[in-house]
Amino acid sequence: MNSYQWAYEKTQHRLRLKHLNQNSLTDEDIDKACSLIEKASIANIETGNQDLIDEFFQPLGYQNYQKLSKDDWAQLNRTLKADFNTSWAPGLNIIVGEKHRKRDNTWWTDRVKREKRNLYWNEYKEYFLDKQFNQNIVRPLENLVDTILNNLGNPEDESFTRYGMIVGHVQSGKTGNYSSLICKAADAGYKFIVVLSGTNINNLRNQTQSRINESFIGHDEKGKCGIGIGNNRAKKDVPWSLTKDTADFSASTAQTMIGGNFDTINVPIILVIKKNASVLRNLTKWLEDQYRDVISDHPMLVIDDESDWGSVNVKDADSPATINKLIRSLLGLFNKSSYVAYTATPFANIFIDYKAENTEQGKDLFPQDFIFPIEAPDNYIGAAKIFGTINEDDNDESEKLSIYLKDIIDNEDTLPLKHDKNFELEFLPESLKEAIRTFIINVAIRNLRGHNEKKHNSMLIHVTLNTNVHMSVHSLVELYLNENIRDVVNFGKLRNASAQSTVFKKLQETFDEHTLYPGIKFSWKEVFESIHNTIGTIITRQVHSTPNLEKLEYLDDSPPINVIVVGGLSLARGFTLEGLSVSYFLRSTKFYDTLMQMGRWFGYRDGYDDLCRIYMTPSKQRHYQHIQTVTEDLFESFKLMHDQKKTPNDFGLAVKEHPDNVLQVTAKNKMKATSQKFISMDLTGKIKETAWISNKEEELQKNLKTIQSFVKVINSGYKYVNISTKKSSSFLWGNINGKLISSFLSDFIVEGASQFILSSKMPIDFVQQFAIENPGKWDVALYGGEDGSLFEVIDGLEIKAQQRKFTDRDSLRVVTNRQVSSGNSESINLPEDVRKSFKSNRRLARAYQDRNNLLMLHILEDKNNTGEMIAAFGVSFSGDGASNRSTKIRMNKVMIDEINKFAEDEGPNNEE
């Protein structure tokens, strides 16, 4: 262990103890720790000051310490801050079903949690989480999982079924999330736990089994592992696993383990199985044949990992697809069951027909009880950081999106995207050779940073689904790696190494390009010395279906590996490459979800994120950018659902389709219950109003206060004009700063349209975006009525309310005819003579040259409930509407039904 790593581990140990004891750790704590180490080192070497040595080093074991360089101190400080100051605010925007709201959804945290011993969770937290993460991560994780468990069934109830979905981000820690949920569910009394591994691939199932062994079971086929090491768990508390490290479910094996005593087993039983028809069928049959009467009253939890793959019904509702049918049949065996779908690409899940049900299998897997979108911690490197979002009007494909991205433009002559199964690769593209050199350099730099003792390093090469091409790519990669190893060993120590070896020269050129980016402080001499020491440790592995391949294993009880991995389908979803820093990606697919799931490079790269590089074609970069934009839209829709207290069953969701039809949201057979629609995204020359209004008193009062506060602000900075008729007075403020309009729109609680403009509701997302993009001068009008009660808006300014009729609809009320304003209200900011000539022609008013956009404020009074004041607003967008732009969207069944519902009783058009 080098001196840097010794200092880091000792300091980390001391700071972690302080963090756990005080539940807080500041930058000052970390700075002080680093400063003390440095001072102690200097004092010992230069002055022999024993006091500083005693203050910091003696409790840690001073005997291994050596003086570090200034760069080492700086790196130590950065690394510790990354370890301890990373935070997480996962958000609690949970969307809850109508029936589910009436249930006891605090049963775990309010009562049961205090009564249970929390054995499995406490072990997982103490022996795993607390050793790897700071409390700014662990505490939010526990709160988050408590919320999820609250929304599952209470094992002590007589019967229940729950269907929920957790939406995360690719490689953001879903396994850690559901591992935590499994531990808490076991503490709560769940007896039978099934984890459906993401795909029908053995290596992913095996990796998931290994994670569950470490986090919950505590042992594997070799003995104790993970939480089982170091704790004093009694043998009687060890969960029973009916699957093993490399063995999926087998009825004969399970029968041998359990015998006839299923009902007397006092510990949880867990299985990690593939989404494979034969495995699921064998499990269901075994349970039915042997234990149906025994198990039916035991609570079961199903964790469906990568739930958009395999689980979604791709056939008719009356004759479901096999995997979907078998999962539903498994759930049907138990009177108490909770099904939790996990995915980072929920497109197929939201497209499930929410009404689908049949007599034999029961309800489909639509998340009718809850949808829970979860934000990632602030150190997560996801699509937003790598690709950003896209302006669909921007066709500049040469734009560099981030330092992580490297263009592949030389593959078509050597390794084309489209090739048949007999394609023979003759030599590697130069871009792939550069990527391999980058990985060699990364391994060396991470070694200099002290990562070599415990941190794995990986490179991904994913260029095809064809196994034969994988094998030829692997052979050529191995040859090129060996060529580098040979020249580094043979020529590296020579003074004129670059002249002697083209390989050596290219390594140095690649390093020089690396150092154009901030963070790499080492010289070429230092890095090459490290390359010389580490390049021989780099290995290659293939991951595909060919038998007898050398296994790719990341073992905790063995030295870390440095590995270049060549693979396809097996690496396309769910499988994690540890310490991934270089990705070379050429795979072609047209599906949003498949493409995003292939992004193994998403995740956490603490201490080496500056080294990460992703090689892909510019067009593929743009595809990822588009999907990221669509995904952000979907997450915003989830937030809107939560804010409006909508349920999964009554809020329509849609996904924006690719403008050039190059990409497809998901496979066609997963979109049977969907429909396409073209929608207008242009608001110019239109009016949009809040005709749909909440019945909730607190929201009504807040919106009244929002109008009053806004009028007070603009009245203090702008003069108003009183525009009066014989029966009413209205007020107009001109040339208002657009930022004030944006602020008002953000504060007002709106019953908005779903995700896109699909009904007469206020499309608040687009209106807010319009205000941001058009921040110039706006006019604001406050309208008075003729016969309504007086309402004091601010001191010295009162108006008569505008009386309107309302129709009740569920928890809302709707202005009759869905028209808040009337007559010539949109002409209020035009010259008086023009206003009179236009009369009530609204289109002419909006199209008037140089007219400002108009924010229209209304205080309404319910004619059937005199005295009740209701705030509303509208926006009249100037322009003639000539520049129309359409976007194609894919709608789920909820949204289709919503549109049809509105179409039945849509009021008159208020555009004229």
Image: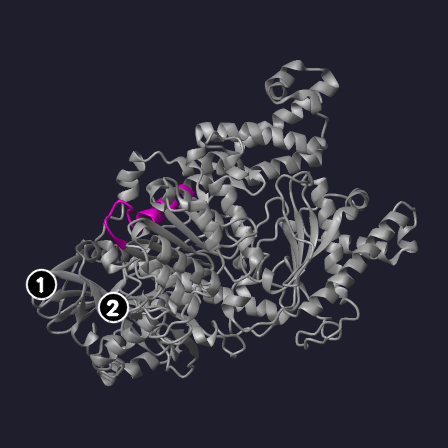
Colouring chosen for the image of the structure? one colour
Q: Is residue 725 magenta?
A: no
Q: Which residue is mark 1?
A: 789
Q: Which callout, 1 or 2, points to the residue nearer the camera?
A: 2
Q: Quadrant of the N terminus?
A: top right
Residue 644 visible within the image: yes
**Is 183 drawn above or below residue 50 in the view shown?**
below
Image disc number at residue 8? none
Q: Which residue is mark 2?
A: 690
Which of the 4 image quadrants contains residue 785? bottom left
User: In the rendered structure, which amino acid carries the disc numbered 1?
Assistant: Ser
Residue 271 is left or right of residue 5, and the answer is left
Instruction: Say which of 619 and 483 sits in front.
Output: 483
Residue bounds of the magenta highlight: 141-160
Circles 1 and 2: CB atoms closer than 8 Å: no
> Considering the numbered disc 1 on the image, is that residue within a helix, a strand or a loop?
loop
Residue 775 visible within the image: no
Instruction: Say which of 778 and 541 sits in front.
Output: 541
- Circle 1 Cα neighbour tier, 10 Å, few/some/many (<14 / 14–19 / ≥20): some
> Considering the numbered disc 2 on the image, is that residue within a helix, a strand or a loop?
loop
Residue 513, image x and y in percent? Answer: 74, 55
